[in-house]
Image (cartoon, helix red, strand yellow):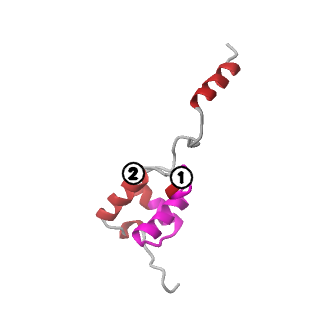
Amino acid sequence: MIGRVRVDSHGVDAVTSARFKERIVAGAELERDGVVAFRAVDAQRILKEEFAIDCSLSSTYRLLHRIKLSWLAPRPRHPQADATAQAAFSQLLDCN
């Protein structure tokens, strides 16, 4: 593996970890990231493209865990979702 730097979750310094956490907590933007919610592969891509850290998916998970981020997240909302239409539809299904 020439050209690939192996980094475990402990090889990322505190400043980089803090910047990475801020980036992930800020959330995904469809225009910038191409997704509406981050997955671990997206975090891995951000590490590689924005922080020049090329690591495995398992190391990405370890880093996310170490900086107190969980892979569990609320269900993402589509950018064109209509809350009013959803509420009206919900009323139609209310069986009580």
On the image, the x and y values in percent for residue 55 come to 48, 71
Residue extending furthest toward the bottom: 2
Q: Is residue 5 above or below residue 87?
A: below
On the image, the x and y values in percent for residue 33 come to 51, 57
Residue at the location (64% across, 22% down)?
88
Residue extending furthest toward the left: 15
Magenta-highlighted residues: 33-62
Callout in the foreground (2, 1)? 1
Q: What is the spatial separation of the Cα atoms under label 2 and label 1, in whole angstroms?
A: 24 Å
Mark on residue 1? none
Residue at the location (38% across, 59% down)?
20
Which amino acid type is marked by label 1?
Leu
* Residue nearest the observer in this picture, 89 or 9: 89
Q: Say whether residue 59 is magenta.
A: yes
Mark closer to the chain start, 2 or 1: 1
Residue at the location (60% across, 37% down)?
81
**Residue corresponding to mark 1:** 30
**Residue corresponding to mark 2:** 68
Which amino acid type is marked by label 2?
Lys
**Direction from residue 30 to residue 47 in the image, left or right:** left
Residue extending furthest toward the top: 96
- Assign the C terminus to one quadrant of the image: top right
User: Mark 2 falls on what kind of element?
Assistant: loop
* Residue nearest the observer in this picture, 12 or 90: 90
Residue at the location (57% across, 30% down)?
83
On the image, the x and y values in percent for residue 6 come to 45, 76
